[in-house]
Structures are given as structure tokens and as C-alpha cells.
Image: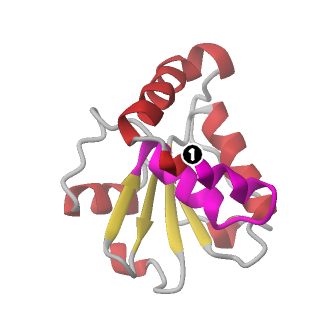
Amino acid sequence: MANDVLKNKQLILFDGVCNLCNSSVLYVIKRDYENKFLFAPLQSNIAKSITTEYKIDTNKVDSILLYNPKKQKVYSKSTAALQVAKQLNFPTKLMAIFLVIPAFVRNWVYDYVAKNRYKWYGKKEACMIPTPELKAKFLM
């Protein structure tokens, strides 16, 4: 199923019930002028296929994942977020400077926010349903 991702696109996997994650997805969509990204909730079949193929335990890695089919690689946590930011336009791409900070330091901050995201930003009962205009950007 991961082959469904077009070779010239990357797939962002996100927590579909998390309000912070949904807001982040909408942020990326607004700034993805070159149409580089597709999106799928971690709860979707394609996400399950990719996490199984790459042996990612979503109980332990409860974060954003960026699947790059060209490189046959999955990025997680802060590295995934910064790899996405790096491909967006100025000024968002400036965030890529944080890639020079060791991942264990970046991920400590990332994990703290991830641990508290439902408390701070809330949670939906079900995954976001994309509007008809955005539907082509989502894989389920």
C-alpha cells in the first residue's frame, strides 16, 4: 500500500484526532506551494502499512512521521517536523537550522509537547474529514 504514494511526493503521517496535529497539517497545506506532500492519519490503513513495513511501533513512537519513498526512509518526531519545514518557503524553512542540534535534545522538547498535546490543545472524537478541496491531498 505504501506504493500508492507517488514517487514525487512525500507522505506526512499524523495523529488524526489531535487538534495540534490537525492545525499543523493545515499550516503545511497552506504553505506547500510546490505540492510536495500528501497526508494520512496514523489511524489509516496506509499508515499501518508503512509502520509495519518499517517496523515502527506507534505505541512507542506517537508522533509525526514523514515517509520519503524516493529515499525509502521514514523520519520521526522533531526530525520529521524539521524535514517538512525545510521544504516549505521562507520563513518556515529557516526552522531547518535546528537540525544542527542533536536529535536527542530536539526530541526531548518534542516529546514534552507531544505528551501534553491533548491537555493543551484538545482531542477530537474521530479523525479530521478533509474538505472536498483538500481531499486529493489525503490518503486513507
- Percent across and percent down for residue 75 are 39, 56
Which residues are the magenta region? 76-97
Q: Is residue 72 visible?
A: yes
Q: Is residue 117 magenta?
A: no
- Identify the residue position indicated by label 1 in the image: 98
Does 45 sit left or right of 30 as displayed? left
Q: Quadrant of the N terminus?
A: bottom left
Q: Is residue 80 magenta?
A: yes
What residue is rendered at 55% in x and 42% in y? 16
Secondary structure beneath dot 1 equals helix
- Percent across and percent down for residue 35 are 69, 76
What residue is rendered at 47% in x and 35% in y? 106
Outermost residue to the top: 119
The amino acid sitting under disc 1 is Phe
Q: Is residue 41 visible?
A: no
Does 46 sit left or right of 60 as displayed? right
